[in-house]
Amino acid sequence: MGIDELFIVPGRSRDDESKSVATLVRQWADREIIAKRLEYHQGYPALFREKMKDLALSIGLQRMAVPADLGGFGWNTPERASDLLDVLIEAGRADASFGVLLAMNYALFSSAPVSGPSDGGSLIKVLSETFSSDELVMPAIVLPGPGHAGQTTALFKSRSILARVRSAGGDSFVHGSRLRPLAAGHDAGLFCIVCADGNDQPGLAFVAGDAGGIVRSGPIVTTGLNACTNAEITLDDVKIPSEHVIDSPGAVESLYSRLGLLLGGVSLGAGLNFFEILQNWCGSRVIKGSSLLKENPLCASVLADVAEELSLTNLLLHDLAGLMAQSQQSGPMDETALFTYAGMIGSRSQQAVMRAINRGLELMGSAGYAKEWHAEKHWRDVKTIQSLMCGVAAETPVKMDTARFFFSCSQV
């Protein structure tokens, strides 16, 4: 049985467009990456960039969240959350780095206003032109984090905001030192930075990668996502148009919520391909000379753990996408509720996929750690995704968000 028949999502109906896009991405992943794992590994990272261009430009995934009236697919609305999730699951099956770059792209459009000034400089128009171009664009997102020792910062729900934005003469200026994006900071063509204004209120600043005043460090060595080369960035009063700053209530929460869903989908996709690898491996391994390994009760119990973690993650993430589709009412409580549930489900999803891969690797032994099987790359990539967001990575901030929402805690 295939993964669609095994990992079901009850009550979900997809239109013909969403079905065709997800099928196209799966077929591409199977043909271009999964069937050529060893060749792909040996040609990394040159092959990654070539294949990413195919996925983003030839298939058009770079334009998925661009509004339809501005040249894209129009999948920037909450109703399309499940469809974007399906696309990222398929991208994650091939290579989690594909998924992470696309997830950051799609998350940007969840926070950008759908309309703006008619002078052509509005944020939504700039984003649409950027991602509708014939060039591959790598976005990078800078979220609040643990902060720096001895430095007092503004806070977003107990997370330190390391960047500042100020307005002067009709423009805005962004300043921040040693900011670490989630991924791709070394080659990013666009930065979305959570920053604080003069009143310590959080907002989002969108900064072009070639803006004057940006200094990037050398590449940072990471456990996984090696194709998304990261680097710390420092901004010295980088000038941006004032309309490229979003200070509306709930903008940062919306960005976090969408990232929790989309990055969860990427990790789930990697986990599902690991399942396929494990399924193939255990279907031909024998013990005691004749009996299949998977028929041993202890081994079967381990295999059940893998299936259980991935199945429940699949259900949780699609439920979260359904919540986003239903969340059309305005108001701080609605946004706070969605932010809280996205944090809980995003955190639990990353943990579950990691547990599934860990259990499977225990059973596979040396075969799981050999690069030829690709299982170890999925482990490294998911582990890195788990560490990207302060919240999904560290349990404490999400626990505090949950306590504030459910128990009205005000001092944590």
Image (cartoon, grey):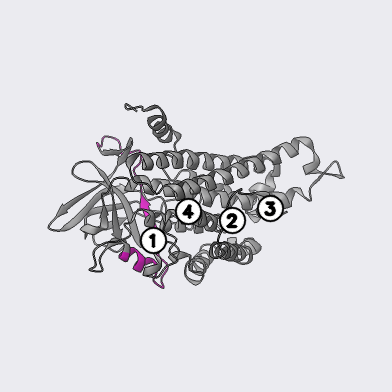
Residue tagged by mark 3?
5
Residue contact at pointers 2 and 4, CB within 8 angstroms: no
Looking at marks 1 and 4 on the same chain, the residue that comes earlier in the sequence is marked by 4
Residue tagged by mark 2?
93
Spot occupied by residue 52 in the image (x, y as percentages of width and height): 50, 65
Q: Quadrant of the C terminus?
A: top left
Type of amino acid under label 1: Asp
Spot occupied by residue 12 in the image (x, y as percentages of width and height): 58, 52
Residue 409 picture quarter: top left
Looking at marks 2 and 4 on the same chain, the residue that comes earlier in the sequence is marked by 4
Give me the C-alpha separation between circle 3 and circle 4: 22 Å
Spot occupied by residue 201 in the image (x, y as percentages of width and height): 24, 42
Label 1: element kind: loop
Label 3: element kind: helix
Looking at marks 1 and 2 on the same chain, the residue that comes earlier in the sequence is marked by 2
Give me the C-alpha separation between circle 2 and circle 4: 18 Å
Give me the C-alpha separation between circle 1 and circle 2: 24 Å
Looking at marks 3 and 2 on the same chain, the residue that comes earlier in the sequence is marked by 3
Label 4: element kind: helix
Type of amino acid under label 4: Ala
What's the magenta region?
125-152
Of residues 360 and 403, the one nearer the viewer is: 403
Q: Residues within 10 Å of mark 1 (few under 14, many from 20)?
A: some
**In the drawing, does residue 288 fall left or right of residue 155?**
right
Looking at marks 1 and 3 on the same chain, the residue that comes earlier in the sequence is marked by 3
Residue contact at pointers 3 and 4, CB within 8 angstroms: no
Residue tagged by mark 1?
187
Type of amino acid under label 2: Arg
Residue tagged by mark 4?
81
